[in-house]
Amino acid sequence: MQAWLEARELRSLMDLAQVAIFRSSLDGTRFLYLNKACAERLGYDDPEQLLQDGQPASFYSDPSVRKQIVELLQTNGRIDNFELEFTARDGRSRQALMTATVHTEDGYIQGAVMDITQGKEAERQLRHSHTFLQTLLDALPTPIFFKDPAGRYQLLNKAFETQLGQKGQELLGKSVFDIAPRHLAEKYHDMDRALLESHGPAIQQYEYSIQTNEGLREVMFSKESMFDENGTLLGLAGVIMDITDRKRIENSLRRAEERYRALYMNAAEGIFTATADDKFIGVNPAMARMFGYDSAPGMTYQVTSIATQLFADPEQLEILKKRIISERVVNGFEAQVQRQDGEVFWVGISARGVFGIGDRLERLEGLIMDISAQKQAEEQLALMVITDPLTAIANRIGFNKRLEEMLQQANRSGCQIGLLFIDLDGFKPINDSYGHQVGDYLLQQVSRRLDRRLRSSDIAARMGGDEFAVLLWDVSGPAAVERISRELLAHLLSPYDCQITECSIGASIGASLYPHHGTTASELLSAADSAMYEAKRSGSQLCFAPLPEKHAEHDGQAE
């Protein structure tokens, strides 16, 4: 879950950036994510609207550029300051520089785009008159300069002066060796010569660190050689764009991505990305270990159908996807899944959907946690609620729960149910004379005797104190209930070895029969309880609740 929160923080950071940031499919045909600045550059107010309506190819002024970018990324894995032209939604063309990286395993291209249209416009305006050009250049915040073929500054703007902290008149006619430390001057000179000695007009772009009056700054030099109409070299013009903030954002983005990658690789929870048609795009090592695969790439390759290979009930995946389509994000979805060796276990799934054009579900991204221990604890807790801790048979809650279940089944099947209410006679004197330890041991012996004499479909329960109850499923009639009651009574009356002494007790049993004595739990319990007290009063030890005359007694044995 920490990895999930980290990803959300990263997205918030990117939305605050002024640089256009995007994420696209590997073939560059579909946006997967873009920040607000990217949407605004393309003429959209809302990134979500652009994700739904726009395709990257439609914004390239030259459609072949997209293919060129994809090919470069596939070959080199990265492009830096790739210059391109794009057309915004309103039809206006813009110049930009793209820096991007390809993440093949994760299935996307990610990059940042800087709009350099203003800089390009400034370069074009250099061909106008000097006065007009100087006025225009001085109004621009980006440092701009022009050098002659000898490398001497002939034109520069106020931003250039401000950056170096010197007056323009002090810089004109000087070379880089006059204004910069020698190691920097040699770098600038070599780059200038490479540009000036090229045959024909050429453009040069590179990033470097320079010392300004504000300290060390990261900048991008964009230079172009200039020729007159006769092909004579005039010199070179250049723009210095301060990319310190952009580089800081890129570094922050890279560090965040590295942190996310570390969390992804080292997380204890399983992390996955899957297509809408049940195939993994990628899983982390914890996911592979959880499902018994040797490696994350191995699991991604071997699992060709998530529904049938991982889910114990394939329909559960469809239920999850329907909820994601409806709710967008689903947390704590519980399902039984199976490891590679077939072992079934419980997981909790938290996932979100990635939607494409037409609001169609394209991918699922999420976390999986093994909750088998939690489910086992829940089952144990549920069992404790319905189990008597002393005797390990059902308690009153468990008895009532099972009685309600039997009544529902009997109502559908027409089966008869016998209910016995048992009260031990003579237990209190033994408990008072020999102590609670002997009394508890005696109650445990009684429970075992009852439980051993019953079928798996029957149930014995301790209702509290020295009171017990028995449910007999699918008995043939009153005679069968009476016969079973007398057998139980005989076993209960046999002496008990109570460790320090031999004990004997009596018992009074009251019996009722569904549906003869009632069709609800309260009616059957009340009839059996009344019969038990009649047995105790009369000393007969066993009493059957009065049978309504309309019911004929059919003797038989329990199955």
Image (spheres, grey):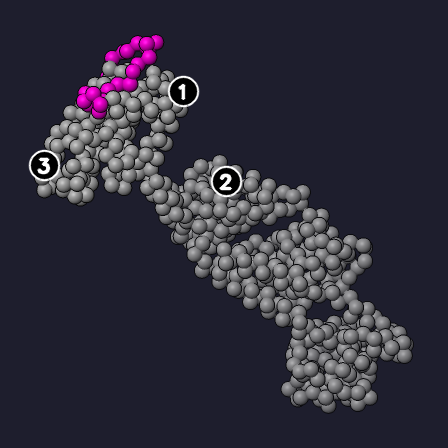
Discs 2/3, front: 3
Element at label 3? strand
Mark 2 and mark 3: span between their CA atoms?
61 Å
How far across and down, in percent of the image, does residue 415 sit?
A: 34, 18
Q: Please tell me which of labels 2 and 1 falls first in the chain.
A: 2
Mark 1 and mark 3: span between their CA atoms?
47 Å
Discs 1/3, front: 3
Toward the viewer: 462 or 156? 462
Please determine whether, in this image, residue 98 is positioned above or below residue 523: below
Give the labeled residue for mark 3: 502
Q: Please tell me which of labels 1 and 3 falls first in the chain.
A: 1
Callout 2, which amino acid? Leu
How far across and down, in percent of the image, does residue 286 sit?
A: 43, 54
Callout 3, which amino acid? Glu
Q: Give the range drawn in magenta.
A: 535-559
Give the labeled residue for mark 2: 317
Please determine whether, in this image, residue 558 is positioned above or below residue 442: above
Q: Please tell me which of labels 2 and 3 falls first in the chain.
A: 2
Neighbour class for label 2 at 10 Å: few (<14), some, many (≥20)? some
User: Magenta stretch: residue 125 in it?
Assistant: no
Discs 2/1, front: 1
Circle on res. 169: none
> Residue, x 71% and y 50% (percent of image)?
49
